[in-house]
Amino acid sequence: MKLLGLVGSNADLSYNRDLLQYIQKEYVDLFDLEIFEIKDIPMFNQSQDLTESVLIQNLKRKIFQSDGVIIATPEHNHTVPAGLKSVLEWLSFKIHPLQDKPVMIVGCSYYDQGTSRAQLHLRQILDAPGVGAITMPGNEFLLGRAKEAFDELGNLNDEKTRQFLGETLHKFVRFIGVASQLKEPEPLPEEDLHATGQIATTIPDVDMHAEDWVEQAIEKVKPVKGATYVELDRGILTVDQINALLKSIPLEITFVDANNQFLYYNHNADSAQMFAHRKPGQVGNPIGDCHPARTYKHVQAVIAALRSGQTERVQMPVPTHGLDKYVVHNYAAMHDDEGHYAGVNEYILDIKPIIDFYLKKTGQQLTGGSVDAVSSASQKVTPPIAPQVDAISSASKKD
Amino acid sequence: MKNLIAIVGTNSDQSTNRQLLQFMRDHFQQVARIELVEIKDFPMFNKPADKKVPECVQQLAAKIDAADGVIISTPEYDHAVPAVLINALNWLSYGIYPFVDKPVMITGASYGVLGSSRAQAQLRQMLDAPELRARIMPSSEFLLANSLTAFDDKNQLIDPDSVEMLEGLFTNFLIFIAITAQLQHAHAQNQKQAADFSWEDLHNSHQD
């Protein structure tokens, strides 16, 4: 389970940050908590819309990809600090990533009150229509007198406090399970699989459907080739060297741009030998050309999820290659330096040799359903002996 | 004649809260001098360890100090006071205490029908915090709903009932200022408590 922890303070030193760090360390078996700092996010101003800025888009993606959010708030002037409120305003103006997201509130303060009023306001704010979070009711975790609450290792001193925090966090994990039942799958904008639009890098006036799209496009833009140097992050290679590198990577790599046009694959095998039988003449096609119409709905769903930031990667095992292989198609979202969606990197590989290598080197073996891979999802039911491949796929789904 | 500071509680270029304060400034010019101030250029409050308050904040604090009272007009974002107004109040109570015992009148305008009711309630609670300790005029909500259509092209409030309501409240506010002036027996103590409460020892330790 992936959680995102928002540090509600932008001060250099903050007990609320300390608390999140303690939770991150202490409950590593319960969830994976990523701590997010809000201090660089500018003041909300509806007249200067920065929704598309890297910082806010980055936060949006992290929220989308988390199962739940923990917000640690200080209290200033009987309410949440301006910095935290500003972040929530950005997240409710043009984008609404907290919509239906399970949220838990915690707070630390220097004094006895432990942010009681700020937490109540925060609940009210999270409940506002533009924010729309599902805040866990009850279970207020207020840490007063924070200065004395932590020891020098950053651990909470008091046994009862630790116990209560643990109970609350376990409840939150269950709450996430319940709250996810409420979430309507968000309708995403439709993907244009025929690439009828155009982006800045689209090579214009070349027929995308043509067998010789590459040759025509070369005539058009005269790309560099051969021994010409190309500056990369981080290094310098010639085009020949880049080709050698990409062809030697033991994956079938395909580049689809943000316009859904298939622009490249690392052509290191004949079509017949590939898991996905790419043909040289397909390059340049809109991806609609590369898939049968009956699969469009599914292809659209994958690309839309990657483009929107709902997920960073989609993994799909394809079982049609026989039992001696376990072929996985991976679809990873790519982004430019500004964080904008730049297309899909599809990479395909057979992971069976990797697993065999691991087992051989470590002397371990697969034990099917008796592996406790799913115990955190369901503590009561231990599944019966399952085929080996199932144990692997259910584990990978938890990513 | 009373001197009042009117804080525009938003950084938006277009604001019906600013319009409302402009209307009040013009409408009440026979009985009070109202100066509108903007808070949009204040940097984000971050509890600097050296407790240094920016120059623009100090200037506003000095104006509030010198004024007989303050009017704050707040929009409502996400059921609450906008971050930019929270930010201004955070700064205006960080080692400086211009609001202690200062008479404050709250107004608010919103595009919808609720007229910033929740934001105003929250603002009252904030101004009541020990380090702000303002004298908020009780029982005096002025909520301007549907504010986009509330003004004519000469920036006059169209609805006569709203004008009457505002006039009544403003007259009350002037009386409230006079009454508050008589409630100053604990002022020195209040100011000391405001200073003591918040930031004692904080520069030596974690801040929140």
Image (cartoon, rainbow, N blue to C red):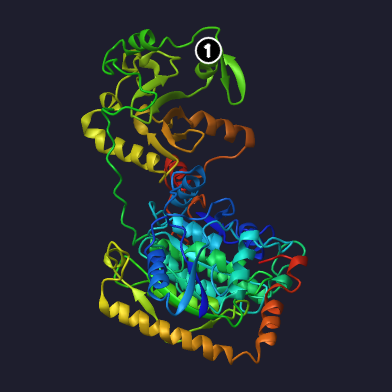
- Looking at the picture, which amino acid does disc 1 mark? Val
Image position of A397 (left or right of B184): left
**In this rendering, is residue B170 above or below A63?**
below
Residue A324 visible to the viewer: no
Residue B42, image x and y in percent?
A: 57, 58
Residue drawn at x 43%, y 87% as measured from the top left = B172
Residue A4, image x and y in percent?
A: 53, 55
Residue drawn at x 46%, y 54% as measured from the top left = A45
Residue B65, image x and y in percent?
A: 62, 75
* Disc 1 chain ID: A
**In this rendering, is residue A173 above or below A214?**
below
Residue drawn at x 57%, y 76% as measured from the top left = B67
Q: Nearer the viewer, residue B4 or B74?
A: B4
Residue B167, image x and y in percent?
A: 36, 81
Image position of A293 (left or right of B145): left
Answer with the quarter of the image where residue B48 lies. bottom right
**In this rendering, is residue B17 above or below A299?**
below
Q: Nearer the viewer, residue A82 or A353?
A: A82
Residue under label 1: A239
